Image (cartoon, helix red, strand yellow):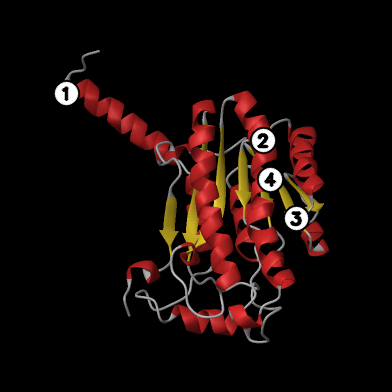
Amino acid sequence: MYWSATEMKFHLTTKESELSDDRSLAGKTAIVTGAASGIGRATALLLHDRGVQVVAEDRDPAVEQMAQQGIVPLVADVTEEDSAARAVALARDEFGSLDVLVNNAGVIINQRVTEMSLQDFNSVLTVNTIGAFLHTREALKVMSEQGSGAIVNVASYASFQVFPTIAAYAASKGALAQLTRAAAVEAIEHGVRVNAVGSGDVVTNILNDVRSDGQEFLAEHGRGTPIKRAAQPKEIAEVIAFLASDRASYLVGSVVMADGGMGISLS
């Protein structure tokens, strides 16, 4: 097909307008794990604001407080095999489809390798990696059949960089990055995109079970990045929403870093 310069300009302008529409997700259905607080809650609410119907999943019963028109809470533990199937079934029963999965549920233990029990190590990997695998597996069954969908995993700068005491967390997030890539090459032939966001320090409750000053510690640690601050949950949610949308239509198996420059800084 040949387009004149005028036709080409119109075509590109039209496409750019479509891609810049933050309502491009409207009418879709999403599952968001770890939705009771932090990045998960911010993501569920942001997607809902953009017209997405959301199954908000968390093992914390506080997720039930998110119930409203277009948001259905599910109290479930991502590490339990039937939770993923329940979440997918709920999305289809309540909203008729499943278009987006956000694997956000995550935990951390700050311990040196020599001080860590096998139970502690496994507890982190089971939530951060196995939980994502289980939900990806069940979501892909539906998305592959319908020929479309997007899965976004919440990875971390710890998928690539480390410091003392985060061995379990780094191992889980490194595995999650590789799960993202492996699932992506399998899923794309069925029209499903799998990507991840490499999150930096975000002011959330993830450290609350580890230390009493969890949010303050994250805020302070974030000041060591080139941007000189930690992120707010909604900033990561914006990247997740982008990756879930058609605006990211050419991204397959990517880990998009949103870490304030931590991953490229030598200081």
Q: Closer to the observer: label 1 or label 3?
A: 3
Q: Mark 1 touching mark 3, by CB under 8 A?
A: no
Name the residue that disc number 3 marks. 79
Tell me what residue is drawn at x 60 percent, y 69 percent: 168
Mark 2 crowd level (few <14, some 14–19, many ≥20, 10 Å Cα): many
Instruction: In the rendered structure, find residue 181 and report the number of the disc placed on it.
Output: none
Indicate the quadrant containing the N terminus: top left, top right, bottom left or bottom right. Answer: top left
- How far apart are the two marked residues, 4 and 1, measured between alpha carbons? 47 Å
- How far apart are the two marked residues, 2 and 3, measured between alpha carbons? 20 Å
Q: Mark 2 touching mark 3, by CB under 8 A?
A: no
- How far apart are the two marked residues, 1 and 3, measured between alpha carbons? 55 Å
- How far apart are the two marked residues, 2 and 4, measured between alpha carbons? 12 Å
Residue 121's x, y, as percent? 67, 69
Instruction: In the rendered structure, find residue 5 and report the number of the disc placed on it.
Output: 1
Residue 118 showing in the rendered view: yes
Mark 1 vs 3, N-terminal side: 1
Q: Amino acid at mark 1?
A: Ala
Mark 2 falls on what kind of element? loop
Q: Mark 4 touching mark 1, by CB under 8 A?
A: no
Q: Closer to the observer: label 4 or label 1?
A: 4
Mark 2 vs 3, N-terminal side: 3
Residue 245's x, y, as percent? 50, 41
Q: Mark 2 touching mark 4, by CB under 8 A?
A: no
Q: Amino acid at mark 4?
A: His
Name the residue that disc number 2 marks. 98
Q: Closer to the observer: label 1 or label 2?
A: 2
Name the residue that disc number 4 marks. 135
Quarter-of-image position of residue 169: bottom right
Q: Closer to the observer: label 2 or label 4?
A: 4
Mark 2 vs 4, N-terminal side: 2
